[in-house]
Amino acid sequence: MSDMSYVRSEMLPERAPPASSVGVIGWMRANLFSSVLNSILSIVSLVLVVWLLSAFLSWALSPTWSGTSVNNCRELSGGGHVACWGVIRERWVQLLFGFYPPEEYWRPMLAFALLFVAVTPVLFSMISRRMNWVMLCVVLGVTALYLGGLAGSIAGLALLALGAAIAYKALSTDKDARAAEIAEGAKRLPNPLIFTAIFPFLTPWLLWGGSLWLPIAAALGFVLAFYAYRYLAAVLGSLSGLILSVIVALVWWLFMAVPFGNAIGGIIPLDLVQVASRDFGGFMLSLTIGVVAIGCSLPIGIVLALGRQSDLFIVKTLCVGFIEFIRGVPLITLLFVASTLLNIFLPPGTNFDIILRVLIMVTLFASAYMAEVIRGGLAALPRGQYEAADALGLDYWKAQRLIIMPQALKISIPGIVSTFIGVFKDTTLVSIIGLLDPLGLSNSIRADANWIGLIWELYGFIALLFFVFCFSMSRYSMYLERRLRTDHR
Amino acid sequence: MKKTVFLGALTVAGLAAGASAAATLDDVKARGKLNCGVATGVPGFAAPDANGRWEGFDVAVCRAVAAAVLGDSDAVEFVPTTGKTRFTALASGEVDMLARNTTWTLSRDVDLKFTFVGVNYYDGQGFLVNKDLGVSSAKELDGATVCIQTGTTTELNLADFFRTNNMSYEPVPIETQAEALQQFNAGACDSYTTDASGLAAARSTFEDPSSAIIMPEIISKEPLGPLVRHGDNEWGDVVRWTLNALVTAEEFGVTSTNVAELSAAAGDNPEINRLLGTEGSLGEMLGLDADWARRAIASVGNYGEVFATNIGEDTPIGLARGLNAQWRDGGLIYSPPFR
Amino acid sequence: MTTTTDPHQASFRLSMLLYDSRYRSMTIQIIALIGFLTLLGWLFSNTANNLADLGKEPSFRFLSEPAGYDINQRLLEYTNRDTHMRAALMGLLNTLLVAALGCVTATILGVIIGVLRLSPNWIVSRLSAVYVEAFRNVPVLLWIVFTMAILIETLPAPKAFRGETPEATMKLFDSVAFTNRGTYIPEPLFSNTLGNLHFFGESSLRFDVSLDLILLAVLFFGGIFASIKIKRRADRIQEQTGDRPTTWYWSLGVIFVPTLIVMVALGFHLGYPELKGFNFKGGIYMRNSLIALWLALSLYTAAFIAEIVRAGILAISKGQTEAAGALGLRPNRTMNLVVLPQALRVIIPPLISNYLNLTKNSSLAIAVGYMDITGTLGGITMNQTGRELETVLLLMLVYLAISLTISAVMNWYNESVKLKER
């Protein structure tokens, strides 16, 4: 009796799902042909893709890489509507660097690599402090090796060795062990943000050349202001301390920095070949304008955002007026100001060249947008943070510096990155006022008798450069948004 | 951060750019570089090559002035300017001189306050038309679509021409010549109008240059020449006489090849001697040394050589001398005497 | 009394301006104001000095001088003898035209792409993603010149329409001609026209309005108003009796019948473009510069709008849809009454800023030779008169006015749809 059973006591073996719902067919059924409408859409899209791709490929795949002129390309390809890639082969360096002296190309490249090193600790918090220093050592080491010479080789090898040592150490000790060492009082590597702070002074020197002492003198202004603040704040209170230290810094910059730099430069010259900014061109110009504008607009934007949030009526009105004015007019009109009016606004005799004027106007433009981004960050901060800071008895500036800003800026990073993408794309507008950014250069190249009539190759190349840049940055910003979101939940 | 980048850049700017308007010659000498405004790209007149070296007919004037003043024809910073930015660049002192296909007009001279120091190319506005349109005169262009480079006097000339002839037309304003040619070749405009030299230069670059013809009508006078700011006559003189030196050199047969020989010692022709500084002190009067004209001629050649190497009949541009022949040959190119 | 011995009033010291929080904010503000005014004064005096040096007195007299140049696309009548002021007005109208066209198409396209990106269809959603990324990550100026180049290179020239066996023919029953100069479409004409209304005499702002169009517009919008009344009435009857009277033919009737009758009375017919001489004549001529700018701006902005729409729809939690379903609403009613009103609240603010961006980006018209206000006032007028300061100032003010108006209108709309929080 007991072994008789009408109820199945063991599971049936699993059967494979029907062929129509798994594998390629299943996937297609679910994702492409789930309904009549979807099927039509899928087929139309497929036809479109195939048509576009075939048209593009038949144009792009042409053996004209070695062409020396439009006519030469026609011979090479045997006629027909195909690309003439010779123009890219001949001019891609120009499209990247403009008229920057070729023997100095390492400088913008180094500046670019250092830019990555400098922003890494800010943007990629998962990369450890040691790896940051490894990156810096590798970049500098490779540059030194490239520059060659005995000193360069020795310095390069030394830097690479140092980098390798740090990397080995970093990889061989695990996180917990290292944490234990630090707890016992082992030395930590310096914070890589130090380099981030040095970078803004280093880059102008790298790009424009001249004496290293001038940027050092400029940096000294900040150091002076810092110590003046420390000392004076203790004596006179924080607000007067702040005002006085700003005055100290201004006096230093306006009257003492240049003579100081020149004097030391006369004793220990540390010079790079000077490059006039009008030799900047091509993609490098776009990047320089974009990075400088964003870098400079960050502090201005913070001030404007704080001003806009403040209870002081006049300050608030001024900030709102500035922000809304800049956001209300197109960038091109600001560039007209840069190209035709800025010199008129400044004291007679002042004369920046056009690229510096453009930098100034684009910076103003970016700072209005930056202010709005940062205001968004401030607004997103829970009210409790402000109240907690007040409860701790912190004054306004301390609260901003220690509590509000670090959090608000962190929330704002995706917005800052999008602003950067926007400004970077907008740098193409400088071609309208005659600067030779990639688009402006493409006009000059098309004025060359050899390459007259070429459009798609040049536009395509420029579009690709911009796309690669902006796309990777927007991906990064999305990644960051996702991460920030998980932080909050 | 903001202030330092600014400051660093400012220092560089301070080193690169000169101060005020008055003594341009001293500024140029102190700077060791001549800032010269040129077009962003006009075939034969001004365009950068693959190495970024500027070449062209207008560029040669800048190089000659640099050679005369600084002794080095490469001591020039070329500042590309558009039709819109050129006058501001000159007025603000960003460039010391402008050599950029600029037409000498009363209002530019008087109202915009620039001194045109001479004419290096006598031009006139013409029309380029596709041959298979079957048009033989600009008067038959009633109702046509005309491509035109914006920001120049050609716009006003065109409006006047069609108005006086009681014809209608459709202007298509375009920023750069490259785009204008693209539209013309695609048939998006029936005619392209600009200075006749520019038309010839443009036509030379066509796959089949004979497919387009230049209409016989020249609807305007376009004396093109280098210009400087009002109010600095010394500097104006330097540029004017450098240009004149090139012209005189051609008139008296001084070329870049024989100039070294001719200037070694005073020769039989007193005009050549004065020009090359082996006699008299013309260079000193200009605030330069005696050798100034020799350097200018040696670096770029005389006017005829400049013409021939950049836009002459043996170049792809293929312009005939025409009005720009020496006065002895029936042209308008005429230099006041070196005396 | 305590008032006489109040220590605060008795001992006002200068340092209180800095340390007393009652005065401190005042001090800071006054310092800021003085700083700002100093800066402004400094800029003004510099400008005055420099202009005096250049011998250019700022003056707006040039606005009343003849412009001397022609403008191809004029929405009002204009010749090259008209003033710079009128030339600027033509430019302004062109700017507004392309901005309005662009905003409409960008919104339609953006909504479609945004919805398609959420489609379960793999290839469609991927293609939409590719579209969005391609347009967002390449400068708009490049797209504008690119679109222009495509139009010029791929469409036939007018001469291709000529001859016995033309290479190209007009499309849509010989009514539309696509050429590489522009597109010609039929234009509405009235054989018994009522004439025009003329405003502002002979001044630079003069304009004509066609009485025919006014009449038609009045009838059409009157019809729409009447149909709304009919709908209200139907609603009322439905509430009272539970039965909704069929009204759709009434609605259609009041909208279209009067309009159609008047159109017939006015002798409405279409004027078709015809190839005459160098170009097509007749019909409405949409220049390629307009089309390129319009298309490029719409496509570019649509990519941003698509992202906004997608985010807006995703922001509405699934619970809302499910709750609506539980109430027994049909899917399209759910969309209309539940999802869309909430999503709009998320969508509208960024949408406004994209409209603003599009309007500002229309200033890039200069790259394709579209004569917007940057091309006329900030382009040719500035070149021909050499009045940089005045023209740029005017240009900025015009754009500022446009931007502020758009934000004001949109913010007002935004207020009206905002969730009323208490």
Image (tube, grey):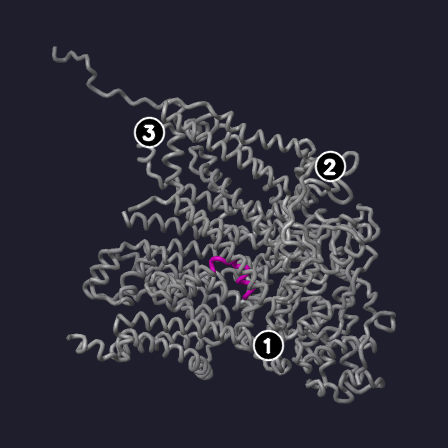
The amino acid type found where label 1 is placed reads Ala
The image quadrant that residue C385 belongs to is bottom right
Badge 2 is on which residue? C167
Element assignment for label 2: loop
Instruction: Nearest to the eye among marks 1 and 2: give it.
Output: 1
* A424 or A366: nearer the viewer: A366
In the picture as drawn, the residue positioned furthest to the left comes out as A2
Let me know if residue A136 appears in the view. no
Give the answer, above or below, for where B147 lies relative to A38: below
- In primary-sequence order, the first of circles 1 and 3 is 1
Give the answer, above or below, for where C164 lies relative to A456: above
Element assignment for label 1: helix
- In primary-sequence order, the first of circles 3 and 2 is 2
Residue at point 52%, 68% (across, down)? A356
Chain of the residue on which disc 3 is drawn: C
The reply to the same-chain question for discs 1 and 2 is yes
How far is mark 3 from mark 2, CA to CA? 58 Å
In the picture as drawn, the residue positioned furthest to the bottom comes out as B280
- In primary-sequence order, the first of circles 1 and 2 is 1
Query: Does C51 sit left or right of C230 as displayed?
Result: right
- The answer to whether the residues at label 3 and label 2 have Cβ atoms under 8 Å apart is no
Query: Does A384 sit left or right of B22 as displayed?
Result: left
Badge 3 is on which residue? C325
Residue at point 40%, 71% (across, down)? C33
The amino acid type found where label 2 is placed reads Glu
Element assignment for label 3: helix
Badge 1 is on which residue? C52
- The answer to whether the residues at label 1 and label 3 have Cβ atoms under 8 Å apart is no
Q: Is residue A336 magenta?
A: yes
The amino acid type found where label 3 is placed reads Gly
